[in-house]
Image: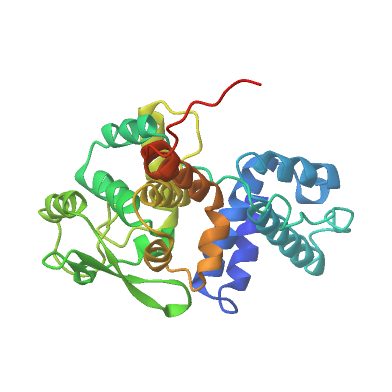
């Protein structure tokens, strides 16, 4: 199956964007691991259903739908190329991307963040985690940063977002200090985060890095870039406002920000109400009522 997936992805390289290739690698890599060395023509509908079910915990219906879509595309291609006699995905109904749309985003606790940072044993890894936690970047936005995109004087990152839309994102002094330490052993230009071959860090390298840190931190939870984004948003809303969060995250419509982080907003409103409640903080009621 791993060889079939590699052939499929290679066949798509000239026809789709690089990010789509990364998406195929991300969604189909676990399928190859799930099926192992089983011959392709022996893969059944039950195998695919079991694989999709194994990816469900901790993932949104929309993300699970992407696993389904990639698997269907792979099987359709394999059927056309004669690798499969029948398509095992046909009987499977696609996940509903709108089901539980308002579920609570997965985020790290303070203890988990401390454990992850303590598990970083090189400057690059610590800088990556602090940038993710301080700026709420998407994975590809982090990996696309160049040294020239960091304005150390003004405290901003020039982030290259979705749809080739750039935005400036503030970055705090602690994260900047970590970047300065990391750049001491850096060529000083080009890609900001480098792999061991001194080339731009890719999605697979970031995933492996986070896996190593998770293991050293002895955490059982899932560790992925978007979870850092949710962690940033939750912490930000405890002190900040929704509109500035929208701008930092790169959402075009504030309704999306509100929808994704509705639960965090309610939590913040409760605490602000506790601090500001006029009934709690003003002596409006002086008289003691009689019991009748």
Q: Is residue 143 above or below residue 119?
A: below
In percent of width and height, residue 5 lies at 64, 57
Who's the residue at 55% across and 64% down the image?
256
Q: Is residue 222 visible?
A: yes
In percent of width and height, residue 28 lies at 63, 54
Q: How many numbered discs sit on the rendered protein?
A: 0
Q: Please tell me which residue lies in front, 176 or 282.
A: 282
Q: Is residue 118 left or right of residue 72?
A: left
Who's the residue at 56% across and 62% down the image?
23
- Locate residue 46: give its quadrant: top right
- Locate residue 38: give its quadrant: top right
In percent of width and height, residue 269 lies at 47, 47
Q: Is residue 206 left or right of residue 168?
A: right
Q: Quadrant of the C terminus?
A: top right
Q: Is residue 75 above or below residue 289?
A: below
Q: Is residue 36 visible?
A: no
Q: Please tell me which residue lies in front, 230 or 123.
A: 230
Q: Please tell me which residue lies in front, 101 or 48.
A: 101
Q: Is residue 160 above or below residue 182?
A: below
Who's the residue at 69% across and 39% down the image?
54
Who's the residue at 67% across and 54% down the image?
101
Q: Please tell me which residue lies in front, 241 or 174.
A: 241
Colouring scheme, one of rainbow, by chain, secondary structure, one colour: rainbow
In percent of width and height, residue 21 lies at 55, 66
């Amino acid at each position: 199956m791993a060889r079939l997936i590699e052939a499929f992805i290679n066949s798509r390289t000239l026809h789709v964007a690089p990010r789509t290739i990364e998406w195929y690698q991300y969604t189909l890599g676990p399928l190859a691991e799930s099926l192992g060395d089983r011959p392709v023509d022996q893969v059944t509908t039950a195998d695919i259903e079991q694989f999709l079910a194994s990816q469900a915990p901790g993932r949104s219906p929309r993300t699970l739908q992407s696993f389904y879509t990639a698997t269907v595309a792979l099987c359709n291609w394999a059927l056309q190329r004669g690798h499969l006699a029948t398509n095992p995905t046909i009987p499977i109904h696609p996940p509903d991307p709108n089901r539980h749309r308002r579920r609570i985003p997965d985020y790290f606790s303070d203890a988990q963040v401390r454990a992850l940072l303590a598990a970083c044993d090189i400057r690059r890894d610590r800088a990556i985690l602090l940038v993710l936690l301080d700026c709420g970047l998407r994975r590809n936005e982090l990996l696309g940063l160049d040294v020239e995109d960091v304005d150390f004087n003004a405290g901003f990152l020039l982030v290259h977002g979705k749809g080739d839309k750039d935005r400036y994102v503030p970055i705090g002094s602690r994260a900047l200090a970590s970047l300065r330490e990391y750049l001491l052993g850096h060529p000083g230009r080009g890609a900001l985060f480098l792999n061991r071959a001194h080339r731009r860090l890719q999605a697979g390298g970031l995933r492996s890095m986070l896996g190593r840190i998770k293991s050293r931190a002895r955490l059982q939870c899932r560790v992925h870039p978007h979870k850092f984004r949710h962690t940033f948003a939750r912490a930000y809303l405890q002190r900040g406002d929704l509109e500035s969060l929208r701008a930092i995250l790169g959402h075009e419509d504030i309704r999306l920000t509100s929808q994704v982080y509705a639960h965090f907003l309610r939590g913040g409103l409760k605490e602000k109400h506790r601090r500001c409640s006029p009934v709690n903080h003003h002596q409006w009621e002086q008289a003691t009522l009689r019991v009748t």
